[in-house]
Amino acid sequence: MTQPVRVLVAKPGLDGHDRGAKIVARTLRDAGFEVIYTGIRQRIEDIVSIALQEDVALVGLSILSGAHVALTARTVDALREADAGDIAVVVGGTIPQGDVDKLLSAGAAAVFPTGTPLDTLVDEVRKLTAGSQVDR
């Protein structure tokens, strides 16, 4: 029996609203992923540490605060500095369409603005994590 793909759903920064992140975490769990949820108000350093400790294939950032570009770039950079640049980073939340390309340029593997169908999110996460369970 194969192990489920492990993903981390994180709420970086000072954003205190987590209903969407919890819906995403539950949806991914129901789709067969093993989901680790950090809770709200996480520091980038802690997110990266948890990602490494839990051996995840993907980090999903849920951001509603408007700081999505900076927080995504900092997360991607911190993972690369920790020699874990192979961990995909996706971001969702209140993302203006004009910022999608900025997030992709900052290193996000995918962007899921508010209103993205959950089936689309699951399909994209499956694609991004296919064959990515590696020992660290």
Image (tube, helix red, strand yellow):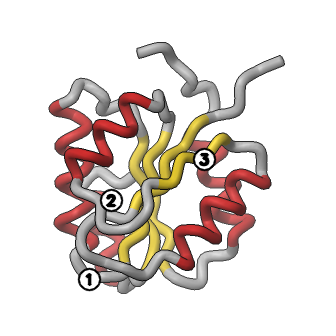
Q: Nearer the viewer, mark 3 or mark 1?
A: 3
- Marks 1/2 in contact by CB < 8 Å: the verdict is no
Label 2 sits on residue: 104
Quadrant (top left/top right/bottom left/bottom right) for the C terminus: top left
Q: Is mark 2 on a helix, strand or loop?
A: helix
Q: Which residue is drawn at 29% across and 59% down?
A: 42
x and y percent of residue 67 in the render?
A: 22, 76
- Marks 3/1 in contact by CB < 8 Å: the verdict is no
Q: What is the crowding at mark 2: few (fewer than 14 residues within 10 Å), some, or many (at least 20)?
A: some
Label 1 sits on residue: 66
Q: Quadrant of residue 68?
A: bottom left
Q: What element carries label 3?
A: strand
Q: What element carries label 1?
A: loop
Residue at the outermost right position: 1
Q: Which residue is at the front of the view, 89 or 49?
A: 49
Residue type at mark 3 is Val
Label 3 sits on residue: 35
